[in-house]
Amino acid sequence: MHFLRILNRDAERWALLVFYVMLVLTMAVEVLRREIFAYSSIWGEEIVRYSFIYLAWIGAAAAVKERAHIRIDVIMHYLGPRAKALLYIFGDLVMFGVALIALYWSLETVHVSWKFGSVSHGLRVSMVWFLLAVPVGFSLMIIRLIQSFLRDLRSLRDGTPVYEGDKLFD
């Protein structure tokens, strides 16, 4: 159970770290190869591109967890705890619906790629591995939305202030 608690707390952070390090190291190697040896590879550019795609989708799930997505929350300053909780619950439900639809269609894309056996140009690896970034991101988002929904329901039930995430500007 301890492992699941750690995974729940840090899964996105570790995945983001892995993809970010992979992106930076590959980009640095490719820049050095291009500037020093006047040679670059196709695979390096692909690794950077697909690492960035995974970073974006896993980062979106992490933002859902931390309630860090950009939002206009001027009206939230004038609402009480109950109204805030209801508004956040409504937002989570709408986002949950959108995430379910997006998950379905992104899995359809993965299925088509798998069915026809498409591969990347430089790495010659099945495109399924790269296209999976979208359903993985939306699956993580759905899990985090369920957690957020339950957290907001608890706040609504207990009458405690709803979790609003960290503020960028005060």
Image (cartoon, grey):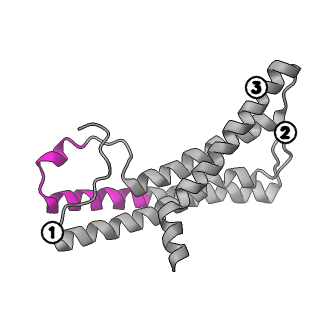
Q: In this orientation, does residue 67 appear?
A: yes
The three-letter amino acid code for the residue at tag 2 is Gly
The three-letter amino acid code for the residue at tag 3 is Val
Q: Residue at x 87, y 24 (%)?
A: 39
Residue 14 image point, x, y percent: 58, 56
Query: What element does badge 1 sit on?
Result: loop
Q: Is residue 39 left or right of residue 69?
A: right
Residue 47 image point, x, y percent: 74, 41
Q: What number is the disc on residue 134?
A: none
Q: Given this view, does label 2 or label 1 mark the residue nearer the observer?
A: 1
The three-letter amino acid code for the residue at tag 1 is Gly
Q: Is residue 141 left or right of residue 37?
A: left
Query: How far apart, in angstroms, are the residues tagged by discs 1 and 3?
Result: 55 Å
Which residue position holds label 3?
31
Instruction: Name the N-terminal-most of marks 2 and 3.
Output: 3
Which residue position holds label 1?
159
Instruction: Name the N-terminal-most of marks 2 and 1.
Output: 2
